[in-house]
Image (cartoon, rainbow, N blue to C red):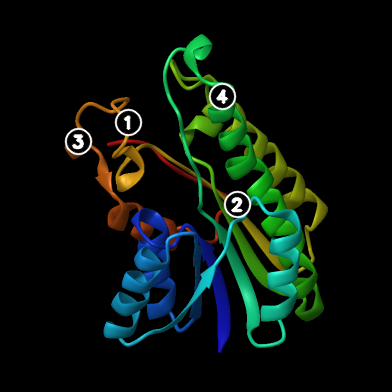
């Protein structure tokens, strides 16, 4: 059974995509830092008849990511990666703390690059696979009170578009996903979004993404 690894799979969009990929016959590796959330997502997948395993992982750890990916490649037939893990700190640019800047760049940019670099050799061995980068519409245009977050997403956009060109014809598909805000735990510790109820659910966004998997760029604006 082919395996898809999803980062930030314990909740929100990561979990919903995991459920849908599972229903399409994939084995899921649920990666993240919260064992409790991952265990809950694993249970949901198994209750729905799917197969999943938990992979405790900090995507910002250079040596750790490479080592873990090399280890699991001998156990699982890795077919895909969804770079979903991300973090955002919002507010006026001059008020964003340096530690918050580093956290966003390390998670959103470095983490995505490291995961992709570690998994690509395993996909190249079989000449097929999929890498999906969850970017958000912050990768399409500037936004007020989101300067550094937007900068991180523009970086991932450029990274993804470059790999689409570099690996064209390789059998490895790269999806860049640009979606508006979702009603997920992402906003729990922020007042940047005043009313989450007006946003689409993570389940709805996941379903739209799955319908558009053949597109290089999947753009889902807020309704």
At x 32% / y 87%, what residue is drawn? 49
If you read the primary sequence from the N terminus, does the residue marked by circle 1 or circle 4 appear first? Answer: 4
Q: Say which mark, if any, is on residue 148.
A: 4
- Residue 154 spot, x, y in % from top left: 62, 32
Q: Say which mark, if any, is on residue 198.
A: 3
At x 62% / y 32%, what residue is drawn? 102
SS class of the residue under badge 1?
Answer: loop
Give the distance between the C-alpha atoms of the residues marked 1 and 2, in whole angstroms. 31 Å
Residue 218 visible in image:
yes
SS class of the residue under badge 4?
Answer: helix
Q: Residues within 10 Å of mark 3 (few under 14, many from 20)?
A: few
Marks counted in the figure total 4
SS class of the residue under badge 3?
Answer: helix
Q: Residues within 10 Å of mark 1 (few under 14, many from 20)?
A: few
Q: Which residue matches tag 2? A: 216
If you read the primary sequence from the N terminus, does the residue marked by circle 2 or circle 3 appear first? Answer: 3
Give the distance between the C-alpha atoms of the residues marked 3 and 4, in whole angstroms. 25 Å
Give the distance between the C-alpha atoms of the residues marked 2 and 4, in whole angstroms. 25 Å
Out of 138 and 61, give the one closest to the viewer. 61
């Amino acid at each position: 059974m082919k395996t898809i690894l999803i980062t930030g799979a314990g909740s929100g969009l990561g979990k919903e995509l995991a459920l849908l990929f599972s229903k399409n016959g994939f084995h899921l590796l649920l990666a993240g830092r919260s064992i409790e959330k991952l265990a809950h997502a694993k249970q949901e997948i198994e209750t729905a008849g799917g197969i999943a395993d938990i992979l405790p992982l900090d995507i910002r750890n250079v040596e750790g990511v490479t080592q873990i990916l090399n280890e699991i490649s001998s156990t699982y037939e890795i077919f895909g990666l969804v770079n979903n893990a991300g973090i955002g700190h919002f507010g006026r640019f001059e008020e964003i703390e340096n530690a918050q800047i580093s956290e966003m760049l390390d998670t959103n940019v470095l983490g995505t690059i490291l995961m992709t670099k570690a998994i690509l050799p395993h996909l190249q061995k079989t000449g097929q696979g999929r890498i999906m980068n969850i970017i958000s519409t912050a990768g399409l245009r500037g936004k007020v009170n989101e300067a550094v977050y937007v900068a991180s997403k523009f970086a991932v956009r450029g990274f993804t578009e470059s790999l689409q060109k570099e690996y064209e014809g390789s059998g490895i598909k790269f999806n860049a996903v640009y979606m508006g805000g979702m009603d997920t735990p992402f906003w729990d510790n922020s007042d940047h979004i005043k009313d989450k109820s007006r946003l689409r659910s993570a389940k709805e966004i996941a379903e739209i993404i799955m319908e558009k998997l053949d597109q290089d760029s999947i753009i889902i604006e807020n309704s």
